[in-house]
């Protein structure tokens, strides 16, 4: 879960999640195609330890 757009405030959600071995990839939803940081992104998500 993220409240910061996964590092890009123009992202408003994940469209697809794909597991590949130990890695998890997410395709973002972003409607600002013509903006410098617009358009969809493919992110490799990393595990964070829970304390």
Image (cartoon, rainbow, N blue to C red):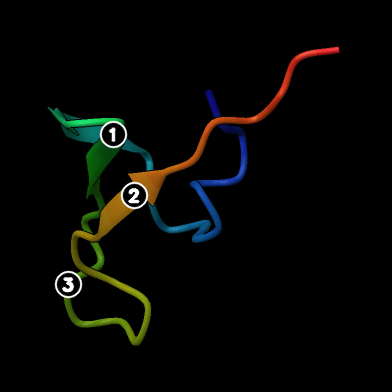
Q: Nearer the viewer, residue 6 or 9?
A: 6
**Left-right relation of 45 to 51:** left
Q: Residue at x 52, y 56 (%)?
A: 9
Q: How many marks?
A: 3
Q: Are marks 2 and 1 in contact (CB under 8 Å)?
A: yes
Mark 1 and mark 3 in contact (Cβ < 8 Å)?
no
What separation in Å lies between label 3 and label 1 (alpha carbons)? 24 Å
Residue under circle 3? 33
Residue depicted at x 29% and y 37%: 23
Q: Which residue is mark 1?
A: 24
- Relative height, residue 1 to residue 11 (above, below): above
Residue 44: which numbered mark, if any? 2
Say which residue appears at 49% left-offset and 61% top-offset. Answer: 8
CA–CA distance in space, label 3 to label 2: 21 Å
Label 2 and label 1: CA atoms lie apart by 6 Å
**Which of the two discs, 3 and 2, sits closer to the camera?**
2
Which quarter of the picture shows residue 14? Answer: top left
């Amino acid at each position: 879960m993220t409240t910061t757009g996964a590092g890009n405030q123009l992202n408003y959600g994940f469209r697809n999640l794909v597991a590949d071995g130990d890695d998890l990839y997410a395709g973002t939803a972003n409607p600002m195609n013509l903006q410098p940081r617009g358009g969809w992104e493919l992110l490799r998500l990393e595990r964070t330890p829970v304390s």
